[in-house]
Image: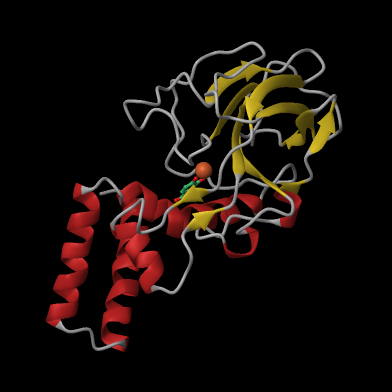
Amino acid sequence: MNTRVKTVVDDIIKAVQDVLIKHDVTFEEYRAGFYYLIDAAEKHEIPLMLDMFFNQTICDIEMKSRQGSRSSVEGPYFLEGAPEITDQIKVGDKAEPLLIRAEVKDIHGNPVPDVLVDLWWSDPDGYYSGYTDDLPIEYYRGKIKTDDQGRISVMGSVPEAYPMTQERHGPVGNLIEMLGGQGMRPKHVHQKYRKEGYKTLTTQTYFRGENYLDDDPVKAVFDELCLDLKEENGVKVLDLDIVLDPAD
Ligand code: DHB
Ligand code: FE
């Protein structure tokens, strides 16, 4: 027996049973939910749905024992096999250039070199690469290591708001609408920072003043994750200040 699994799963089942009892859920309603989940699975939307409801909760749990930068949802679109890049991530012709710079420090303010940084964001139509044949994994994502100053500087592009709406997604968009929510995620750049001896940080950065920040379907927007875009020599610039915690 796995006691940890038993403890958590027993409690999940008890919580669901309590809700069914509380609301006198009928067999027809139970079956509707059952077929909803089957449909979501067949359309490969289970990861989207689980992350929408639960990923931020896991980040909040992580934040109870973190001192460095806030962790935020990884979401369903991280890919381990992103290309290694030097200073540029491939983007399409329609994309607006964005220079992404990051400075990574430890909790004492010392630069951390050799951190593996993954960056990924949506294309101008709100799609992530690697999930459709016409947008290969080489685009809109890449990995790079920080230099001896703990810095990276990468040419990328401005992300687009990401629709989880009924129009673009089936079961999940439908559920968001039934729950009275709106299905657009605000523009964001995903990041993951990894180095031995430090806790892995997975987070997102949003752009101050953009749409949907107040009503994120994933509930992952926090003020400290929202930054102003700068402009240097006519190019938009995003400056990220990252603090990594030591590993336990
Ligand atoms: C989710 C997260 C994202 O960053 C995104 O672009 C879409 C969905 C999610 O957690 O479901
Ligand atoms: Fe995303």
Residue 234 occupies which quadrant of the picture? top right
What residue is shown at x 82% (from left), y 17% (from top)?
149
Q: In the image, is 54 to the left or to the right of 27?
A: right
Of 226 and 96, nearer the camera is 96
Quarter-wise, where is residue 248 in the image?
top right
Residue 72: % across, % down: 60, 47
Q: Residue at x 69, y 16 (%)?
A: 114
Question: For this view, does 146 lie left or right of residue 108?
Answer: left
Q: Is residue 58 visible?
A: yes
Q: Residue furthest front?
A: 94
Foreground residue, 109 or 55?
A: 55
Asked whether, in this view, residue 14 is left or right of residue 140, the answer is left
Query: Looking at the image, can residue 7 be seen?
Result: no
Q: Which of the colour schemes (rainbow, by chain, secondary structure, one colour) is used?
A: secondary structure
- Above-or-below relation of 87 to 207: above
Q: Position of residue 100 (x, y in %)?
A: 71, 28
Measured from the top left, where is residue 92 in percent x and y? 52, 24
- Is residue 127 shown above or below 129? below
Above or below, 191 against 93 in this view is below
- Residue drawn 40% across and 26% down? 135
